[in-house]
Image (spheres, helix red, strand yellow):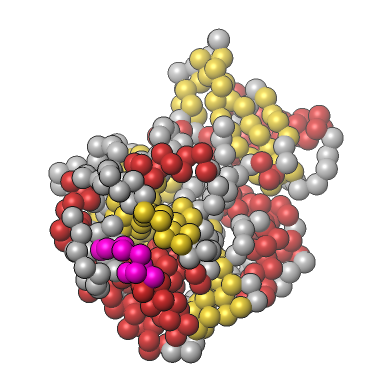
Amino acid sequence: MSYPLGTYAPHFAGLSDRLRVRGENVVLISGDQSFSASALLIAIDSWRDELRSAGVKAGNICAFEGDYRLETVSLMLALMQAGAIVVPFSYGMPSERAELCHVAGVEWQIDWNSRSVFKRDPSSPTTHPLIENLRASRRPGLIVFTSGSSGKPKAILHDVERVATKFAMARQPWRMLLMLLIDHFGGFNTLLACLFDGGVGICVENRKPETVCKAIATAHAELLPTTPTFLGLLIGSGLWRVHDLSSLKLITYGTEPMPPATLKRVKEVFPNAQLKQTYGLSELGVLRSSSPDSESVWLKIGGLGFETRIVDGELHVRSQSSMLGYLNAPTPIDKDGWMNTGDLVEEKEGLIRFVGRKSDIINVGGQKVFPAEVEDVILEVAGVTQASVRGIRNTVLGNAIVARVSLDEFEHQAHAIERIRDHCRTRLQKFKVPIRFEIVDQSSMSSNRSKKIRT
């Protein structure tokens, strides 16, 4: 099913009006180039003309690969304003691309660099009921994939209009780095927040600490949305001593628990920046959050359009902006709209603290071990910048703990391991102390999404 190009979503369509009001004010910075709202609108119109000429219709599923820059942001917005269903891919993992395109039912592949629009698999259009229902509603869509850490990636279908409703009321604008990848729902949420709220999006070529520090200093970034793992890498690199990062006013972090030791170090390095923990899931959206203070790992989450509850220590969320469903798996959202997130939390006085994922628990001789608990203790050791804990098979205990650790400067491995092991023995029960420590380079401790690797 398809229908003529047009703009259908009331909330999402309002973005164009907000951009027109901004006129010649800068909305995107990429390298040494700045682009105004007017330039972005012209780029969107140019893409709309090219898509129409190529034969792309509303309701078509269109994929592209790239990172944030004028060409990709304008392409994404043009597709959504035209009522298409967008499948963005970040660079990397080309071996998986064909399978993911098949799961998503991609009909058009777009190369923004050559400005080419290719028809793909015209003989086998998708007939998934969720896709058909979205097309019938005449609204644009977004397909993103889960990380696939516990199996094959799941294709998540979102109604863009439903997602955009949370931006109906403009909030404080920021000069923010577009750190989370273009195919990450958190990245999409950041982009919409930036554009709807009147902010400036700062594009980066990659997520290496050196590149990010240069972008902050050059573009005078105010907001850094990132992960605890990246913040650990940044602190360990020492590059904050070399670059002027004083423009930062707010650092938000999420996607994984924040080790208290890392939080303390970040506060010491950025004493004038507010630190804020965020929480969201690709399936549900990003919830509003607040903490008692910048150094607290306890927070309150929810806000307009979200409800939360705790069942047997696990966080459940109900969201008005939740996904329509998975295209290749049963939905985890029950008939009443609740989703068990799988995140284990503690609760006190209306606040929660994330303990870890239920799926991450390691059973050692019948005892439960949370990797984050052991990692937090290891990070207390002077000179340790990153720690990653996992379980391995053990003939006696069933499982045993091993740890990979990175240091901020060279130290003889045997001496470093002895220091770390001694500290663990004073702070942890015997079964939680790793039986093996590996000293590794910190660049091997995180994925291209700046998340901790525990394999």
Residue 342 belongs to magenta span: no
Residue at 76% in and 65% down: 241
Q: Is residue 222 visible?
A: no
**Residue 29 relative to residue 194: left or right:** right
Q: Which residues are magenta?
A: 50-58
**Residue 178 relative to residue 213: left or right:** left
Q: Is residue 128 above or below residue 208?
A: above
Query: Which sits in the foreground, 295 or 329?
Result: 329
From the top left corner, tell me how far across and down residue 23 is, in percent.
Answer: 43, 89
Query: Which sits in the foreground, 87 or 229?
Result: 87
Residue at 36% in and 42% down: 102
From the top left corner, tell me how far across and down residue 405 is, in percent.
Answer: 68, 37
Query: Which sits in the foreground, 371 or 84?
Result: 84
Count of marks, rendered view: 0
Q: Quadrant of the C terminus?
A: top right
Q: Quadrant of the N terminus?
A: bottom left
Residue at 45% in and 68% down: 73
